[in-house]
Image (cartoon, grey):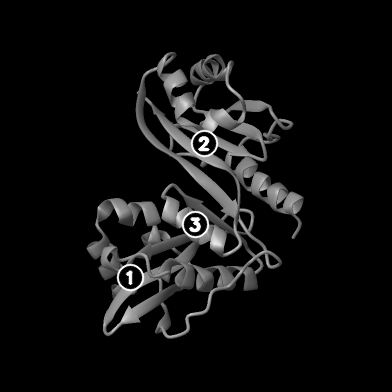
Amino acid sequence: MPMDCLLSRARGLWEGMTEVPGASFAPTGGVTVVVAPNSTLSPPGWLGVVVLGGSALVTAPSEQAAAAVHRAVAGLSAEAVASAEAVTALREVLPVGRVLGPAALAYTSRAEFRPVSAEGLTLEELPAGHGGLRALEQVSGEPDMREAGLFTITSPGFAVREGDTVVAAAGYRSWPSRTAHISVLTAPGQRGRGLAKVTGSAAVAHALAAGLLPQWRARVPASRRAAQALGFRELGTQLSVEPG
């Protein structure tokens, strides 16, 4: 799939998640702000920002919030609208609570995917609710568990097991527009061994075989590197901001 087709599919996903008919990304370098109280682009009632291919799409829960966003981003480039700089600008025009992101958004295709072999490892396919996956989340701690989102997957889990213990796993959740949102988690004591690439590769292969668009969202540099090693290309950034 050529780069422009990847970008088109990714934009179509996020445009649909605004739940606003006709909402679309601005031309390159532009910023579109829409009032979208039912948007799933961010948690309910939050401001949602996605930058893809050099243009930004922002959802606001109310007209008042949308007006504040317009004021805050007036002096920013489209790329900066999903950055810490934008959060600082928003704090000057409205109260700000929690912030999620910025996180990189990366995508791949059959042509660009670079699979990684599980040679020498025990790689298993497990049901999404398997106890081994839940045990991996427990040992990883709540922050890493929520960052990975393994508990949300609708696909099978693809796990590396050592003895009776699952030490790494990946899967994906089915999103709108035939998108597979990839989740990857490795136990703290097992990181640095390339296990995220092995399990992630299995999850991505499963998604591509089903005709889905794999999406990898990551803040942590190690996760971003794993995605890039598998042939993902970073096309943009996501940011969610809770009005105070």
Q: Residue drawn at (37%, 63%), measured in percent from left and top?
A: 185
State the residue position of label 2: 38
Q: Quadrant of residue 192?
A: bottom left
Q: Secondary structure at mark 1?
A: helix
* Total residue callouts: 3
Q: Secondary structure at mark 2?
A: loop
User: Tag 3: Cα neighbours inside 10 Å, few (<14), some, or many (≥20)?
Assistant: some
Asked if the residue at tag 3 contacts the one at tag 2, i.e. Cβ–Cβ closer than 8 Å, the answer is: no
User: Tag 1: Cα neighbours inside 10 Å, few (<14), some, or many (≥20)?
Assistant: many
Q: Residue drawn at (44%, 47%), measured in percent from left and top?
A: 219
- Against 243, residue 237 (above or below) is below
Say what amino acid the circle numbered 3 marks: Arg
Q: Nearer the viewer, mark 1 or mark 2?
A: 1
CA gap between label 2 and label 3 equals: 34 Å
Q: Which mark is residue 67?
A: none
Q: Which mark is residue 133?
A: 1
Q: Earlier in the sequence, mark 1 or mark 2?
A: 2
Asked if the residue at tag 2 contacts the one at tag 1, i.e. Cβ–Cβ closer than 8 Å, the answer is: no
- Against 220, residue 113 (above or below) is below
Q: Which mark is residue 225?
A: 3
Q: Quadrant of the N terminus?
A: bottom right
Q: Secondary structure at mark 3?
A: helix
Q: Quadrant of residue 230?
A: bottom right
CA gap between label 1 and label 3 equals: 23 Å
Q: Earlier in the sequence, mark 2 or mark 3?
A: 2
User: Tag 2: Cα neighbours inside 10 Å, few (<14), some, or many (≥20)?
Assistant: some
Say what amino acid the circle numbered 1 marks: Leu
Say what amino acid the circle numbered 2 marks: Asn
Which of 235/72 is in front? 235
